[in-house]
Amino acid sequence: MKLSTVTPICKVCMKDIKDETVGSLINNTNVICSRCFKGLHPTIQNFRVGEFKATSFYEYTETAKGLIYKFKGCFDYELKDIFFLNQKGYIKFMYKDWVMVPAPSYHEKDEIRGFNHVVEMFSSIGLPIINGVVKTKDVKQADLSSKERQRIGEYLKWIDGVDIRGKNILFVDDILTTGSTALSICQMLKQHGAKKVEILVGFHTKNTKVFNLFERIIRSFVAYDLS
């Protein structure tokens, strides 16, 4: 009997994926083709937000904007695994024994969407996640003036009973623009006893110190599996 096979489909362009794609080479999982992955301009950007070290993994291009909108604006839950498919081994290796605290969404938006997009986006990495912060008001950074953005911490509240004392914490978010939210939450994390605090985001709107991730990721992870 001849067994039928199903050709995997890229979740971004919806075209057939061949076996030689980056996703299949690194993680043996086909969810994004190499063309779409390269189209997101994968680069590691190292920068600082206040006193805190920060790292991002993609340029915030028009392609990225469309993908994020499809994920969190159109509720396309199936896209959750593509953002760090080819970087999760690197992140787990670099941040072994760290815990992630995600940026909060306003609870009504999470209820409408059916999921918290930041939690789902970063859950594929495999590090522990602690929800420690809630957003008390539905405010958008884009709607705020520069002075109002500096006061974003007024709309953030620590969840009673969440204990992070002595832990190394990664604050994670999908996009970093001004850094006001990241800075406020990182300061909150330190105030609640975190040993170390760093920032990890998918997309950063400014180009800083970068290196090409696409080529290095192949050299680094085809040789051994860190996932």
Image (cartoon, helix red, strand yellow):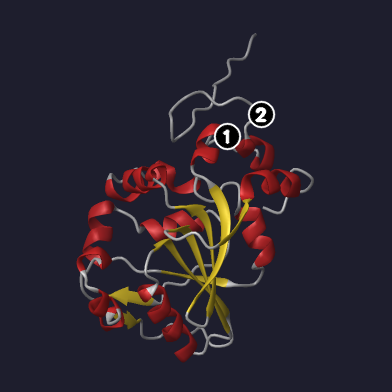
Q: Quadrant of the N terminus?
A: top right
From the top left corner, tell me how far across and down residue 146 is, in percent.
26, 75
The image's mark for residue 60 is none
Instruction: Estimate the spatial distance between the alpha carbons at disc 2 and disc 1, rounded to whole Å.
Output: 9 Å
Disc 2 is placed on an element classified as loop
Vertical relation: 116 (above or below) 62:
below
Residue 144 appears in the figure: yes
Residue in front for this viewpoint, 16 or 56? 56
**Residue 167 on image: x %, y %:** 58, 82
Q: Which amino acid type is shown beneath numbered disc 2?
A: Glu
Q: Amino acid at mark 1?
A: Ser
The residue labelled by disc 1 is 34
Residue 62 falls in image quadrant = top left
Q: Nearer the viewer, residue 134 or 42?
A: 42
> Residue at left 45%, top 35%?
11
The residue depicted at 24 percent of the width and 66 percent of the height is 140
Mark 2 in CB contact with mark 1 (< 8 angstroms): yes
Q: Which residue is mark 2?
A: 20
Query: Is the residue 161 above or below the residue 202 in the image?
Result: below
Judging from the image, what secondary structure is the residue with disc 1 in?
A: helix
